[in-house]
Image: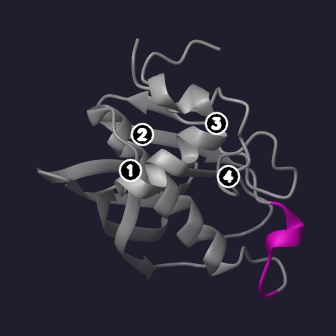
Amino acid sequence: MQDPDKLNDQTTYQRCFACGQLNESGLQLTFRREGARIVAEYQPRERFQGFPGVLHGGILATMLDETMSRTGAMRREWLMTGKLEIRYRRPAPVDQALRVWGEIVRERRGAIDAAGAVELADGTVLAEGRGMFLRLPEPIASATVADYPEFVNYWQT
């Protein structure tokens, strides 16, 4: 798969709950860029429902968190969540495909403020998010590289 923005983990790790393709229990989101936005589609799984027929709000929050933090790829940085706010607008049905997007609202040294939404195919907004995402602390980055050396050159083209 062509992924010039390196939005999807192509390393041997791939175990993230939201985006890890090797995590069979996770969401396995696959991201792409649409202009200034990071976007992914998701077909809800019944096992992630809360109320019958409704996707659990924690899954919507996870989708927004991962997608908004993925905007760090535009700066070629790993980011972690510093603050996350979710506004739930409508129940998310488990029988309809969802689209999640995130975009940078403001950049500053060491942090990004991002916004995003989870929508139905017709554009109906189910949940909106805003967050502040911080550069990954050096001790965590160093420990990751020790276990997964391919991360050291991840952002190099």
Could one spot residue 101 in this view of the protein? no
**What numbered label is drawn on residue 102?**
1
Camera-nearest residue between 28 and 109: 109
User: CB of mark 1 within 8 Å of CB of mark 2?
Assistant: yes
Q: In which quadrant of the rendered image does the C terminus lie?
A: top left
The residue carrying mark 2 is 38
Q: Sequence-wise, which precedes: disc 2 or disc 3?
A: 2
> Mark 4: which secondary structure?
loop
Camera-nearest residue between 73 and 55: 73
Colour scheme in use: one colour
Residue 17, image x and y in percent?
70, 57
The residue carrying mark 4 is 16
Q: Sequence-wise, which precedes: disc 3 or disc 4?
A: 4
**What numbered label is drawn on residue 153?**
none
Asked whether, in this view, residue 83 is left or right of residue 108, the answer is right
Q: Residues within 10 Å of mark 1 (few under 14, many from 20)?
A: many
Q: Residues within 10 Å of mark 4 (few under 14, many from 20)?
A: some
Residue 68, image x and y in percent?
40, 54
Q: Sequence-wise, which precedes: disc 1 or disc 4?
A: 4
Disc 4 marks which amino acid? Cys
